[in-house]
Every structure is written in C-alpha cells, then in structure tokens.
Image: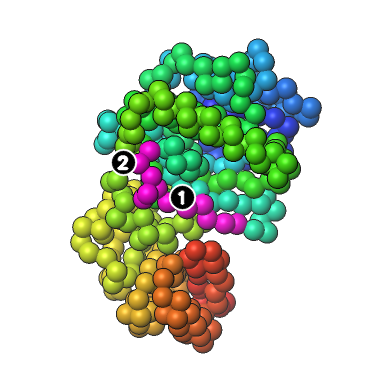
Amino acid sequence: MKFTFVTSFYNTENYIQELYDSIKSQTYTNWEWIVTDDFSDDNTKQILLDICSKDRKVKYVEQSKKKEMFYNPHWFCKESEIIVELGSDDVVSPKALEVYLYYFIKFPEVIMISCRSNSFLGDGSWNNFEVRNFKNCKNLLCGNILYLKAWRNKIANVDYNPGDWMEFFYNDLVFNAHLEEEGKVLILPRALYKYRYRPESISRKLYTMENLDKMINENRNIVSMVNERRGAEIETIDRYFEDIVDLSLPFMDMEFSMIDTQKRIGYFTTSINDKKFGLIKELLFDQDVHLNKFDREYDWGFYYIKTLTDLVIIKNTLDKVFDKNPNCKVRVLIDNIEDELLKEKIQTELTSFLLQKYYYYSSCFDFCLFTVGIPS
C-alpha cells in the first residue's frame, strides 16, 4: 500500500525542512510527497524545487490558480491509493504511516483515518494537547477538526470549492462530508502529529470578531447543503476505540508520540478491565505493553489516575519502576475527575508525594499530565 502526502505551501520557507525530515523518518517507507507553492512571496518555491531535484520521492506540481491544491488535493494524485494531507508548517510522527497502514488493512470499510495531535510553538515555549471528543458525534458534520487526515482515494473528480465560493477554510467540512458518505471514519486516540500554532497564519488572521457572522453563515450553508444531499442523517464514526478514549490519554505525551522504535511500556491503573487493556495493546500494537507489572525494566511508565486507589498504586510502586531503570520516562495522568474535591485531593497528594523525592513538571488542561524523573 502506497501513501501519497500532499502539501500546499504559502510563505513557510522556515518550516519546510522540519516537515521534510519528519516525512523521511517514517518507519514505513512506501510513500511519495506531492508539493506545490501557493504563489508565495518568500523563497518557498525554490526550496521545494531543490528538494525535488535531489529526492525522486518528492514531486512538484504547478497550480493554475491560488489554493487549487488546498481545496482539491485529489486532482494532483488521481492514481494514488491513500492520500495524506499535511500542513505546511507541521510535523508528522515517525510511526504515523506504519500505524495507519495497520488500520487501513484491518478495517477495509474505513474510508478515512485521523488521530490526536499535539500543538506547539516553534520556540518550544508552549505545547498543548489536541483531544477532540467524538463520543456525541454521529458523523463529521459535528465540525471537529481532523488531524493527519488520510483517506482512500475513491473520489477523484469532485470539485470541493466550485466557483471558489468558500472564504473561511471550511473546505475540510465539505471534503469530509463527501468522503464519509463512502465509508467509516476511524479516529485513533493516539497522537501521531504535531500541529504548529502560528498566530500570524492566514487562517487565524481571518478568524476575527468582525468576520464571525460571515463564518457562521458559511458553516450553516455547508451543513444545509450536505443535509439536503443526504436526505437523512448517517452515522459514520467508527466506535472501535471508544471505550479507551480516556484511558489512552497518558500516551498524548509529545516525546512519546515521536519515538521511532519499539519500547517496553508499563501501564499502571486500577481503572481498566481485560477488554479495555486489550484495546490499549492494539492501539499500541507496535509497542511492548504490560499492565500493572512492577518486576520488569521499562523504557516508559504510564500511570492513569482516576481514583484514590490509583494514587496509592503510584505511591507504592514508583520506586520499583525507577529501581529497575533510573532512566525510565514516567508520565502520570490525572483524568478529568468530575468530583472537584476528589480531584483537588488527588492533585495535592500527588504533588506532595512527588516533591519528596522526584522532579516533575505538569501540563494541565481538562486533564493533568505530569512528567516525572529522578533528580541527577
């Protein structure tokens, strides 16, 4: 199975090499990359042409008008088997294609696959977790963003922006609506992408209060158009991993998402049964994952904390994990506990415990993910 990456670039000369390096680092190597410059003012086009001259797997195509590939990437790779859309300033995980290949083969009824993402600023001063909840979505008209979208190339001749009428980049919504009418959509609860946050990007400049009404109207027009075409509501979201959407949150760690080899992983929690752990193992099929076994040497240790019992486990076992491998990378996640008093108690006790012996830092949003280690 061959994957075709497609990317349209506009004034992103500073990010091309980083994206290219992440593509070259793929553990699955049957890929090509089709690129174009969207009439940039900087040196983007020349950089792309230089890469193409040195790498036969990278192909440059000319556009007849601005945003032609952005709105209709399939026009430029009609013979491709799987198309993968990449942002011009983002980064893809080394294992992305390996993982996508596994699921495209396993689920022939799936037309499209997406995944979780980390967001970051290029200077390393900030990162975030992009976790979209599809539990209440029957299909992609819910409007959730899809990261690292890849699809079977079954629709070749549709124009997704006829007359260039779209103004606010809702092309994804139009595109996704057509694709999901051809099959199921699998959202992997695993981070395989890094989305670069740039306040100066074109799309963000358009999202202003002055444009809010026009944006809402454009979105409504698209949804109305799709519903009229369909006639009835369809359900396209594949629910295969729905039971572990929360349990998989510890693996959102940005460093973990970028590993390129198999690691031995310890996963520690009481909030799981055999069926759900089986799904965790399948989600991380390319890794060596063990549940609640503290007598082994691990490269990575993940604690999922939802109850006070989970908190007791980390207090009683963290020393054992580090005794086996002082260089083990440990991540501790406190999930979004509805009981605020319980959540505060767990957070307070955990930080107090960690302060006694370990170093740590945390990123807290709907959940808190702690990076824990032994002081040198």
Is 28 left, or right, of 52 in this rendering?
A: left
Q: Circle 2: is it few (<14), some (14-19), or many (20+) Cα within 10 Å?
A: many
Return the residue at label 2: 238
Q: Earlier in the sequence, mark 1 or mark 2?
A: 1
Residue 137 is a magenta residue: yes
Residue 132 is a magenta residue: yes
Label 1 close to label 2 by CB (< 8 Å): no
Frontmost residue, 107 versus 316: 107
Q: Residue 352, relative to residue 265: is it above or below? A: below
Is 358 left, or right, of 261 in this rendering?
A: right
Q: Residue 126 at x, y = what percent? A: 64, 58
Report the residue at 67% width, 15% height from top: 65
Frontmost residue, 8 versus 207: 207
Frontmost residue, 258 versus 76: 76
User: Does residue 186 show up?
Assistant: no
Amino acid at the residue labelled 1: Arg
Q: Residue 108 at x, y = what percent? A: 27, 30
